[in-house]
Image (spheres, rainbow, N blue to C red):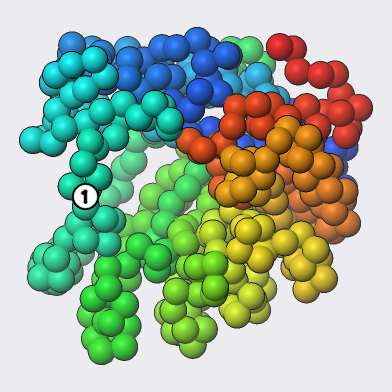
Amino acid sequence: MSASIARVGAAFRHVAPDRTPLFEIFCAYHPIYWGICGRTIGTDEALCWDAMADGVAWEELLEAHAQAAFQVNKFFGVDMVRLIGAPPRHYVRPVKTGPKRWTRGGKDYIFNERTKLVELEHPSEADSYANRFTEDEYIAMIEGWDGQIPTTFEPDPVYRRVRELAEAEGIEWVYMGEIGCGTGVAFYPPFMLMWMLSEPELYERWLHIQTATGFPRTKALVEQGHSVIAMGGDVSTDKGPFISPALYHEYILPTIQAHVKVIHDAGARAIYTSDGNHWDIKEDFFFNSGIDGYKEVDRAAGMTMERLIAEGIKDRVCLIGNLDARFTLCLGTPEQVREEVISTLSQGQQTPGGHILHASHSVHEDVKVENYYAVVEAYRDFFGMEPLAL
């Protein structure tokens, strides 16, 4: 068993590890890759779109993305890995229309110099997640479901390739898979929120489809080597749950409990991942759900280490956080980041339920490169490790 696997396992078993495990999600095309992997079609989205416009082979795209993911996780010495997928095998080729400009699907795209991402030139053309389908289309999908459930699932190709690269170098990480089964109420269209009150049978049929298809996928993720499964998604805003605690207890809690059982029966750890302020649903969210861990610990929404300790969450649930990815990592200085890392690690050592260091969301487009380097340097210094090999 590798040190990383033992370290993460100890945190989940509520046993003090040799040091706090380190985990992070590195969003695709973040400039943090550039100093580690260079600017390639796997690390620079403008280069990727140019390559897709030229008809680059999907296999080349896959290899570039897998190499980037492997190298960045190896460089920072993480213990647990959550991978981001490559562009789809049958990607839609954009048409290059100028320097860092493209069209695809009748819409114009440009390279945003601030975020370093390719974005719609006219953001109003984007469809919100909740408005991708009409109410009639949702009803037709529910009524037209034939009850068939997939029985085979191919591993994500980036995951498969990164494991090959890691194993070739004798690296054993803990791999986190992520899947939602209808509990992410933040992504419900408005009419579905109304169904919970006015059309409960219709809503329950939709939720049954999510679990009937999602639970087998969950089992497949575990069989493929993901020993930690993150369930999603968001159930709360900064001011509290998206739905009433009563509706959460009636519909969302039983679904989470059933999902947790599937994960545990398959031999993996179950964590719930959600931004927001969960104090109004504390008992159900943290305790009655049966989860092993809590990710996206949203300090800015009031989910502070201090209160998680005071409320007893730290005694029973592994906390996977709590670096502020809304303010400190985006707007703070490296010294402010260092102070937050040291404070979080010190508080995390008071948590018999376990603690894994992680940003409150991810290394997303607004996180400064120098600030994430400051995270890892402070972490390594806290535990007396050698500095990063820059």
What residue did someone put label 1 on?
Answer: 124
Seen at 73% across and 32% down, the residue is 334
Seen in the image, is 33 located left or right of residue 58? Answer: right
Q: At x 21% / y 49%, what residue is drawn?
A: 124
**Spot occupied by residue 288 in the image (x, y as percentages of width and height):** 62, 76
The crowding category of the residue bearing disc 1, from other C-alpha atoms within 10 Å (few below 14, some 14 to 19, many at least 20), is few
| In-front residue for pair 58/301 | 301
Which quadrant would residue 210 be assigned to in this image? Answer: bottom left
Toward the viewer: 373 or 100?
100
Dot 1 falls on a residue whose secondary structure is helix
Residue type at numbered disc 1: Ser
Question: Can residue 26 be seen in this snapshot?
Answer: yes
Query: Is residue 227 visible in the rendered structure shown here?
Result: no
Position of residue 87 relative to residue 351, above or below, is: above
Residue at figure coordinates x 56%, y 36% from the top left: 367
Q: Quadrant of residue 363?
A: top right
Q: How many marks?
A: 1
Q: Is residue 155 above or below residue 39?
A: below
- Image quadrant containing the N terminus: top right
Q: Residue at x 86, y 24 (%)?
A: 385
The spot of residue 304 in percent (x, y) is 72, 61
Picture coordinates of residue 298, whole percent (x, y): 62, 58
Compared to residue 337, the image places residue 241 above or below, namely: below
Task: Locate residue 262, reporting x and y percent.
Answer: 50, 60
Whether residue 287 is situated above or below residue 234 in the rendered picture: below
Q: Is 24 situated left or right of 129 in this image?
A: right
Quadrant, the C terminus: top right
- Decide if residue 171 is on the left or right side of residue 116: right
| Quarter location, residue 75 | top right
